[in-house]
Structures are given as C-alpha cells and as structure tokens.
Image (spheres, rainbow, N blue to C red):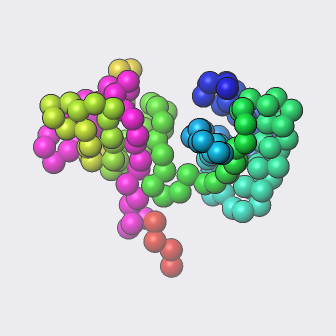
Amino acid sequence: MKTHDELVALIGPVVTALGCELWAVEYHPGQQESLLRVYIDKADGVDVDDCERVSREVAAILDVEDPIPGAYRLEISSPGLDRVLVGAGHFARYVGRQVRVELVAPIDGQRRFRGEVLDVEATGVRLHTPGGDVRLPWAQIDRARLVPDMETSRTG
C-alpha cells in the first residue's frame, strides 16, 4: 500500500488536469473492501459531471499503478459545507471562521474544540474558543472540519 503522500502525488496531477483542486484524500482499510475517498473542489463548485470525469480518470490511473491491495471502493465528492480541513493551507483559507477539531490525545483534559481560527502557525493552529484562546499542534490534530456558516450558505 502506498502512503497517503504517494496517493496524493499519484492522484493530484490527474485532478488538476481536469480543472479541479484535490482537496483531500482519505483511505479507510476494511476487512472485505477498503474505501478510497477523494474530495475535489473548484472555485465555482463541484457538480456531478466533475465527479464522474475525475472518477473515470482516477480509476484508470489506479488500475495501472495498483497502489491499493485487494478490493476497494473509490468515491469522488465535493468537500461540502462542513469540509474536512487538512494542514495549514486549509486552515489559512478559513481564518475568522468557526471550526471543529478533534485531537489524538487530550490537551488539559479536552479532546474536542470548537472555535474561530485566529492564526495559522508553523507548529499548529490557534483558535478562539469560549474557554479562551488555544494552540493546537498539527501532530495532535486527528480530525478537523469547517463549521458551516448558515447565513452565507443559504440560497434564495
């Protein structure tokens, strides 16, 4: 099995060539079947046609390179309103917005944080939470998601 970074290096150029941004890659190994989920984004939003085109091309490169052992399911989707945030670049895009972060291990007895992204630093991210400002080291972040801003997300 290739590492996460090798999968990103393999899939990224294909996604970019199709006019999309590779937002995130998740691999979930399973007993019978594994799951490879690829999130793509575009400035004007992702539609079903984008997902189909990317799926076809990514499936073709995965068939040739065969980076994942055994059976797996490939899913291509938009990151959505509550998008997964991975790394400094994602957090930097959402300075001033609310995020939910779950840590690998508790800091001062707390594993889950919700707060406004204040600053992105080389060592982690700084949030303003109801309990005060906190610094969360990159190595401790297990999962992070944007909290949808329902005021700006409404259509109509």
Q: Is residue 62 left or right of residue 27?
A: right
* Residue 145 position in % (x across, y down): 41, 47
147 relative to 43 in the view: left or right: left
Which residue extends farthest top? 122
Residue visible at 46% across and 66% down?
Answer: 153
Seen from the viewer's position, the closer of residues 73 and 148 is: 73
- Does 9 sit left or right of 142 as displayed? right
Q: Position of residue 123 (x, y in %)?
A: 35, 20
Q: Quadrant of residue 64?
A: top right
Q: Position of residue 137 (x, y in %)?
A: 32, 25
Taking the spot 59% from the left edge, 38% from the top edge, the residue there is 29
Residue 133 seen in the figure: no
Frontmost residue, 95 versus 25: 25
137 in relation to 76, above or below: above
Quadrant of the rendered structure where residue 48 is? Answer: bottom right
User: Farthest residue in the bottom direction?
Assistant: 156
- Pick the front one: 7 or 154: 7
Residue 3 vertical position relative to residue 53 in the rendered view, above or below: above
Q: Is residue 153 above or below residue 68?
A: below
Let me know if residue 106 appears in the view.
Answer: yes
Percent x, y of residue 62: 79, 36
Horizontal side of residue 35 vs 148, given as left or right: right
Q: Quadrant of the N terminus?
A: top right
* Residue name at image x 48 percent, y 36 percent: 86
Q: Could you tell me what secondary structure mostly forms the magenta stretch?
A: strand
User: Residues in magenta?
Assistant: 125-152
**Number of marks present in the image shown:** 0
Q: Is residue 128 magenta?
A: yes
Residue drawn 20% across and 30% down?
Answer: 107
